[in-house]
Amino acid sequence: MRTEALALSDVTIDLRQQRILESIHLDVEPGSFTCLLGPSGCGKTTLLRAIAGFTPLSRGDIRLGSKSITHLPPEKRQTAMVFQSYALWPHMSVGDNLGYPLKLRGIPRPERQQRVAEILARLELSGFESRAVTQLSGGQRQRVALGRALIIDPPLLLLDEPLSNLDAAIRRSLRGELRRLQKSLGITTIMVTHDQEEALQMADQIVLMRAGEIVQIASPQHLYQHPADLNAARFLGVDNTVTGREHDPHSAIGAAIFGFRTRDALINTAPNKAALTRKGRVNDCVYTGDGYQVSLTAEGEELCATATSPIALGTFVTLQVPESALIPFGPDERQLPPLDRHEDIA
């Protein structure tokens, strides 16, 4: 399987006199898995379509390996794309769907059959050659759509929310399968998703987008622990914010706001001088399966935390968040680097 690096320089797109993408710069290493992540309307699908050649650039350049593909039509770019809708031919068998791209390229029938058998074995679908695609499950159809893209041996694989039509259990299973297949093939892959969990589990590199621009490019762990600003943090599951006080952790770096996730905030645990501490009255307590989520009002701020047992409404409690789970932001809502931070930025 071939693979190439991808480089985007100053990619800008205007559609109907509206700026959709603004000066996108992105480098994708050969053989890596990159996720374009962001809310609906942020421009991630437009960016993927621009790489595929379906959306023209207003300015900028796209290079695959050492070659510019900016002005090439989609069929000349040697990329393969898997669409959200699968786009399989319903009147064709699994084998015919897989072999169709090879037939268009004039590959002789014996070679087509051999390559179809090889890709079916990789996808753990051996023996499905003659089956109608309408008889397949959603997960099996997705594998066939992926196989049809891979069978042409592309240097770049583009995935447009390929798992979004599947139920949660199948989606979780296919994440691992898709990641293992990508690694075994070593193919450069770019996937669009709005699912933070999906991006964190699958990507080597995440490109977080907002309003047509790139907010942050980072490894999954770095992005999760060190989002660039408060909006990025909220998108990545930081569901609590508190105003910083003089004796809070990180006060030495001038933190004006702290963000933290509910699962990291604990109720009535042993006192910890290094933790952020707030006292408040319980407004709600709901069972979540592995514990209880407690809502409380502390100094006029609404916060959520976790507890191992139910707590009566109106009870005064102490909330604590370990220093390691706090994300400090300045007055401009940009994240502040802790004084002892030594992680490498991906």
Image (cartoon, rainbow, N blue to C red):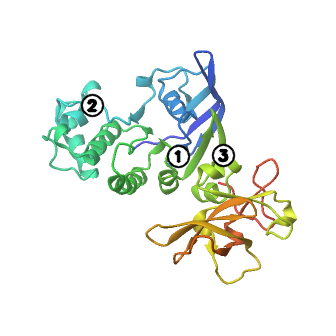
Quarter of the figure with the N terminus: top left
Query: What SS does tag 3 mark?
Result: strand
Q: CA distance from mark 3 to mark 1?
A: 13 Å
Q: Earlier in the sequence, mark 2 or mark 1?
A: 1
Query: At which x and y percent is residue 220?
Result: 57, 55
Please tell me which residue is depicted at 62% across the width and 20% down the height of the picture.
18
Please tell me which residue is depicted at 27% across the width and 45% down the height of the picture.
138
Query: At which x and y percent is residue 215?
Result: 67, 42
Please tell me which residue is depicted at 17% across the width and 31% down the height of the picture.
92
For this rendering, which residue is in front, 180 or 304?
304
Quarter of the figure with the C terminus: bottom right
**Labelled disc at residue 102:** 2
Q: Label 3 is placed on what type of residue?
A: Gln
Q: As drawn, is 38 to the left or to the right of 242?
A: left
Q: Which residue is mark 1?
A: 34
Q: CA distance from mark 2 to mark 1?
A: 27 Å
Quadrant hosting residue 242: bottom right
Q: Label 1 is placed on what type of residue?
A: Thr
Is 121 placed above or below 64 here?
Answer: below
Q: Which residue is mark 3?
A: 216
The residue mark sitting in front, 2 or 1, is 1
Q: Label 2 is placed on what type of residue?
A: Leu
Crowd tier of the residue under label 1, counting other residues whose Cα lies within 10 Å: few below 14, some 14–19, many 20 or above:
many
Quadrant hosting residue 39: top right
Do the residues bearing badges 2 and 1 touch, measured as CB atoms within 8 Å?
no
